[in-house]
Image (spheres, rainbow, N blue to C red):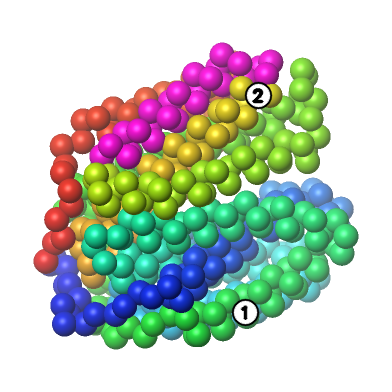
Amino acid sequence: MRLPAPDPAVTTILDAKARLGLTLIAGGAVANIYYNQPLLGLIVSEFGDAAALWVPTTALVGYGLGIIGLVPLGDALPRRSLIVWQCLGLAVALLAVGLAPNLACLALAHLVVGVLSCAAQQAVPFAAELAPDASRGRIVGQVMTGLLTGILLARTASGFLGAHLGWRAVFLAASLLALAMAGIARATLPHTPQTQRLRYRALMLSILHLARSQPVLRTASLSQALLFAAFNAFWATLALLVENPPFGLSAAGAGLFGVIGVCGAFVAPVSGRFTDTRGAKPVVLGGSLMVALSFLVLWAGGTWSLVAVGIGVLLIDIGMNGALIANQTRAYALVPGARGRINTVLFTTLFVFGALGAFAGSQAFLVVGWPGVCAVGLAFSALAVLVAARDPHGPATPAT
């Protein structure tokens, strides 16, 4: 199967207004799947213990389904229109969450919220599509900073608002924010013509062709997925470590470690600029080594020193997010007309390995304790170092 490229005569300028719009939309959209996490205690008190499982699970499952089923449409339909309509749909779905009368309605509404929140993953390839080749990494890094910051601020803002006004108020406010994002999209994003006319079945089948025919995409997906597995092995068990002796932190205290993660968000543009000038391989290799080093620090001092835990968090977030920008940048350079489908391959692989890492880390903690978690994280990150070091691919050459 030959993947059609966009008409080279079509050019659209990505100005500062559009970059800011995409950054805000990426952060505002992805935030919707994380609002529920600090509110679970309040939701459980109303709907019962089952809500602790179904609410976060349906939101994340929906997000994965959106990446697979909706993000590829950006390669066949104007992304601006897709983003606007997804934000409008989000406003309705979030309103349904805020007014849900029972757990079944709440879980179903969260599933829809997750699906439509993949507007964040429409924004990133849109930025890559419109960015000049020489600055694609920097611009992708800027939009990803918005996405990563949105994840952090979602937990902080929803916890504060929920504590004062109740959990329903959080989702009613989020509904208004989604309407605002639709307005931002209409006001700031450029119109782009429909350059490909693919039926949905052909569009989805072409994802498999991309995965088979693009070795750089496979390498980028595998190396980042291994880092994401290590990342999730750590974050799935961190609260279990710090809430028990000798630390004895509260859930709120454990959550404060997420604030350190903002440093990982702001390293994204730096990683993008370095990728633009030096290529992706040194950035990915450096990020992978940093994640591996973090687990050595956590193994040596994580059971007795909160400072060591904080250093580990910082190294993991900077290393993983820096490598992510480099891997995204080189993957987006492969087939200009297929960036949505490239995003689907990349993030579907990440989600699968992320789930594997969370499971392996949790089991290791239950069986061996914290050293087991560190061994799992070190194993995944060492494999990522090996993949990056043995990567034979030079700078990506766009396919035609």
Magenta segment includes 286 = yes
Pick whichever, 57 or 31, lies toward us. 31
Dominant secondary structure, magenta: helix
Left or right of 286? Residue 176 is right
The label number, if any, that marks residue 307 in the structure image: 2
- Residue at the (62%, 30%) spot, across then down: 310
Residue 91 position by quadrant: bottom right
Residue in the foreground of this view, choosing between 171 and 115: 171
- The percent position of residue 198, horizontal first and vertical second, equals 25, 78
In x, y percent, where is residue 222? 32, 41
* Residue 289, image quadrant: top left
The residue at which mark 1 appears reads as 180
In the image, is residue 10 above or below residue 366? below
* In magenta stretch: residue 316: no
Instruction: Name which residue lies at 54% across and 80% down.
Output: 184
Question: What crowding class fits label 2: few (fewer than 14 Cα within 10 Å), some (14-19), or many (20 or more)?
Answer: few
Which region shows up in magenta?
A: 281-305
Q: Quadrant of the N terminus?
A: bottom left
373 is higher (above) or lower (below) than 98: above
45 relative to 223, above or below? below
- Report the residue at 21% width, 47% height from top: 216
Residue 249 in view (yes/no): yes
